[in-house]
Amino acid sequence: MTIPSVRIKEFNDRPVNAKGDYLLYWMVSNRRAHYNYALEYAVEEAIKRGVPLLIFEGLRTSYPWSSKRCHQFVLEGMLEQQKIFQKHKVQYIPYVEPQENAGKGLMKALAEKAMMVVTDIYPAYFIPKMQKAFSSKSPCRVIGVDSNGLMPIYAPDRTFARAYDYRRFVQKNVERFFLDRPKKQPYKSAKLIREPIELTSIYERWTIPPLPGKDQMDGFLNNINYLHEIPSGAYVGGRQAALYKLRSFLTEHLPYYHEKRNDAEQEGTSFLSPYLHFGHISPHEIFWDIIEEKGWSPHQLSAKRGGQREGFWGLDPGTEAFLDQLLVWRELGFNTCANNPEFDSFSSLPQWAQQTLLDHSSDEKEYVYELEEFEHSKTHDEIWNAAQRQLKQEGRMHNYLRMLWGKKILEWSASPMDALHVMIELNNKYALDGRDPNSYSGIFWVLGRYDRAWGPERPIFGKIRYMSSDSTKRKLKLKNYLAKYGEQPSLI
């Protein structure tokens, strides 16, 4: 077995079904055919047990905050995967539920004919509860595999309260975990059985519509009853789109990332967060593409392993800054979600943050807005309104303004609990990278998670770090940004 054991977790204690017809890989969060430990594990088990591999990737209609925006992004990835698996004669069922509950019982029926089920480990959103419920009823063994990041989420033995401490842990364990990577395309193995799997009873009981082509995509998506009517965003889903953005970032922005990631006029970010969230690209692939392009080797690592943000990798400042975001800040969120089931509640904040926010919850507020006013950019602040419009229109928000966006929601809400509810609702509803551990990190950072107490103590914020629109105007060039996302003049 080539998969590190720390990445593998038994979801139930059911026996392997020796009479099973296939090994079932239930693709849930690692929606990719490349650099995927869970897929690699499923391939190895199928070969070991002498059965073909069946891959099932489903898309429910009524998932929390469901919308055309998320559906289209996932579906575009499915179309790419279908071509890949067809080419390599691996049986793949991409199932897009045509209406609510149409797929009820389908996974259980697939599991009844399976020798074993392999699935992804993902510590946030509704996925852990869904997998727990399925595993308790599955007739065969269910194994979860972690392919979320370069650091296995169960490798640390604790939850880290600060990025500094997690960074130090990463630096001390780079050689142990980061220098391995999953295989690019494990299903290319010559030993994998590629005979067609007999699934007549499944297709007779469930209607599994074919995926629409690009020309039929819009009509197909318009016939689904989503929880929210939100149009598509500014991204095309799938690995090829992710690779295009990665290549553009490496050639045009990476050297200046430390300077331009907060530039609203010439934003120098990677734009990869939606692809990471939906699993269309692996963090391993991003990491190795970067360091191989830089001609990096492990001897460049600093001998100092004290949690420093700069100089550890022996690379230029832009690359060091990006790797810190990818390997520290992103994976810190997974560490929190994996170890604290209440990660999305107010009670999960550090005690000092809870106390100072509650101490100031009754402070007088100049402005108080409700969720609907926030959602429709009905505040008095043109910068905040512009950032919210960008989120609604594109499914993303400028990095720095996302922090200001959250701080102002805290300042203008009736209570810190109300502010948390508004941030989660708007972010998860509109952002393509919402509902993600990294996304929750950003929301809870607004309220003090991963931060420290700041002085002087302020009304409403207490000891929570403060941000203002006036300081943002001084820090960022916003003329073009406000022209693009600001309130448009009436044509009447």
Image (tube, rainbow, N blue to C red):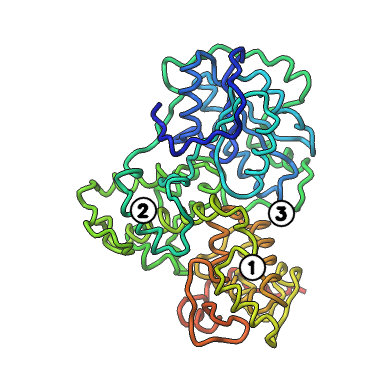
Which residue is rendered at x = 47% and y = 56% of the image?
Answer: 332
The mark that comes first in sequence, 2 or 3, is 2
Residue 68 vs 118, above or below: the answer is: below
> Are circles 2 and 1 on residues that touch, CB within 8 Å?
no
Q: Quickly name the residue at label 1.
A: 388
- Nearer to me, 184 or 479: 184
Q: Quickly name the residue at label 2.
A: 170
* Amino acid beneath label 1: Gln
Under circle 3, the secondary element is loop
Counting from the top left corner in percent of width and height, residue 132 is at: 65, 39
**Residue 253 visible in this rendered orientation of the protein:** no
Residue 224 vs 424, above or below: the answer is: above
Gap in angstroms between the C-alphas marked 1 and 3: 14 Å
Left/right of residue 216 with respect to residue 123 in the rendered view? right
* Amino acid beneath label 2: Val
Under circle 2, the secondary element is helix
Q: Which quadrant, please, contains the N terminus?
A: top left
Residue 196 vs 143, above or below: the answer is: above
Q: Which quadrant, please, contains the C terminus?
A: bottom right
Q: Quickly name the residue at label 3.
A: 230
